[in-house]
Image (cartoon, rainbow, N blue to C red):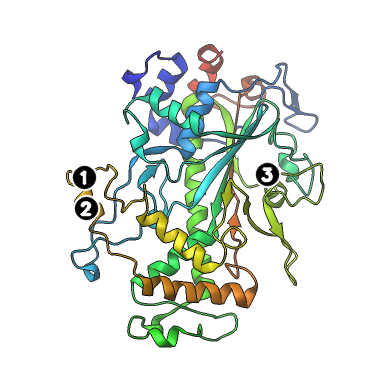
């Protein structure tokens, strides 16, 4: 992409040519931003420099590295039990900068800086939107154009417990920084796993109440219930899947921090309930996600941000059948991975996309039976894990190298950090 920049920026040139091995070996959490202060202790230091936001171009390169579409996804090539049909697990036609279990791609990304709070939807972005997949200017412009501003000013996260871990109160979400916030539709991920089980001949049982799912006994011509999964195990698998998805996205960004010469780190020390919108303080609205409190559960049950990021559960879908059908449409509908009318990486893309195993009405019915049972029995879906999940964040800021020169020996930061301010004004 470097030689396709219409106006190569010196900082972009450095980032594009920075050695991967140096980024891996040099990755560290560097928390001391310009404008920061540590008032006491062995590492006491007060920055002489005012906080300053990232250059817009480097910010967009960083965010696109974390959340960006990177071209066409490769579909699953073969499963012996599917014969000549392709497995239909994949849910997005476009690939992103990080892996997603079975190609489900159920996470999206928010970010905040001094100017506002933004949403960057990329999970269903198709490379058809790119004029040239190798042109960096085009790539960055595409992602910049998709960012939706939700509010003016930085997302307010009080620098105190319980909103923020004590060791982060002096350095997280500080002026000048960009904070990236991955959020997963875990409810959709569980539906996708239920579809996966049905397509492969089994289902779940309710291990919490130690009983089978009523109605599945009529489906033994299709399901082997002797090998049914415990419900809570399937849900924990989904939680693990999205945690890895969002964590690897942030790790890609952490490597880009090294190439750009930015300070920052990936971390979990912000209260997700505050960030999503259940702080209990009207002056701290967070992202404003809808939630309700459930009997016997002290934690809020989030379902989504209306019109922006809606999990596949009521009230954002009429019922669990509607949620299941929406997931199937995402696979086979316009722009989905099995839509033969869109482009792709294959020489005969239309033939490949149209050869996927269908998800028939019976499979939808069986999946709905399980999902609806969970929702009616537990008053929520999923039963044992959140419908909306947030855990890991990535922060970027301009590094104050004087702090490291004062308190560290040689090698505390990379050449890219030393050169940053000369390359990025």
Residue carrying label 1: 346
Compared across the picture, whether 151 is left or right of 264 comes to right
Disc 2 residue crowd, few under 14, some 14–19, many 20+, Cα 10 Å = some
Vertical placement of 21 versus 80: above or below?
Answer: above
Whole-angstrom CA distance, mark 3 to mark 1, is: 40 Å
Circle 1 Cα neighbour tier, 10 Å, few/some/many (<14 / 14–19 / ≥20): few
Q: Is residue 78 above or below residue 361?
A: above
Quickly name the residue at label 3.
287
Cα–Cα gap, marks 2 and 1: 8 Å
Q: Position of residue 344 (x, y in %)?
A: 27, 43
- Looking at the image, residue 125 lies above or below residue 235: above
Circle 2/circle 1 CB separation < 8 Å: yes
Horizontal and vertical percent position of residue 261: 52, 24
Q: Nearer the viewer, residue 147 or 260?
A: 147
N-terminal of the pair, mark 3 or mark 2, is: 3
Most foreground residue, 221 or 408: 221
Q: Secondary structure at mark 3?
A: loop
Residue at point 71%, 18% (across, down): 50
Question: Of callouts 3 and 1, which one flags the residue occurring earlier in the amino acid sequence?
Answer: 3
Q: Quadrant of the C terminus?
A: top right
Q: Which residue matches tag 2?
A: 352
């Amino acid at each position: 992409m470097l030689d396709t920049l219409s106006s190569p920026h010196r900082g972009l040139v450095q980032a594009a040519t920075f050695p991967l091995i140096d980024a891996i070996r040099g990755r560290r959490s560097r928390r001391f931003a310009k404008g920061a202060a540590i008032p006491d202790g062995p590492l006491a230091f007060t920055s002489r420099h005012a906080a300053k936001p990232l250059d817009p171009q480097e910010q967009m390169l960083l965010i696109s590295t974390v959340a960006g579409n990177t071209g066409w996804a490769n579909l699953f090539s073969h499963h012996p039990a599917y014969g000549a049909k392709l497995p239909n697990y994949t849910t997005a036609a476009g690939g992103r900068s990080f892996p997603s279990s079975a190609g489900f791609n159920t996470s999206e990304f928010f970010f905040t800086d001094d100017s506002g709070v933004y949403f960057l939807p990329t999970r269903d972005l198709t490379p058809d939107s790119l004029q040239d997949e190798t042109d960096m200017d085009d790539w960055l412009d595409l992602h910049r154009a998709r960012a939706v501003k939700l509010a003016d000013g930085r997302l307010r996260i009080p620098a105190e417990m319980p909103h923020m871990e004590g060791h982060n109160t002096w350095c997280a979400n500080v002026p000048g920084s960009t904070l990236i916030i991955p959020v997963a539709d875990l409810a959709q991920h569980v539906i996708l796993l239920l579809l996966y089980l049905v397509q492969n001949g089994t289902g779940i049982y309710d291990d919490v109440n130690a009983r089978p799912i009523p109605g599945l006994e009529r489906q033994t011509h299709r399901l082997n219930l002797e090998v049914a999964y415990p419900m809570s195990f399937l849900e924990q698998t989904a939680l693990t899947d999205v945690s890895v998805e969002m964590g690897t996205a942030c790790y890609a960004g952490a490597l880009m921090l090294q190439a750009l010469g930015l300070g920052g780190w990936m971390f979990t020390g912000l209260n997700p309930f505050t960030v999503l919108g259940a702080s209990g303080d009207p002056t701290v609205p967070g992202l404003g996600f809808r939630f309700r409190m459930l009997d016997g559960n002290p934690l809020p049950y989030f379902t989504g941000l209306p019109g922006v990021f809606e999990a596949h559960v009521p009230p954002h879908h009429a019922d669990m059948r509607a949620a299941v059908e929406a997931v199937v449409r995402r696979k086979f509908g316009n722009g989905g991975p099995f839509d033969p009318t869109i482009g792709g990486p294959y020489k005969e893309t239309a033939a490949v996309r149209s050869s996927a195993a269908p998800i028939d009405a019976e499979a939808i019915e069986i999946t709905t039976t399980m999902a609806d049972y969970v929702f009616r029995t537990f008053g929520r879906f999923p039963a044992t894990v959140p419908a909306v999940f947030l855990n890991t964040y990535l922060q970027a800021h301009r590094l104050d190298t004087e702090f490291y020169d004062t308190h560290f020996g040689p090698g505390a930061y990379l050449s890219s950090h030393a050169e940053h301010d000369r390359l990025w004004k």
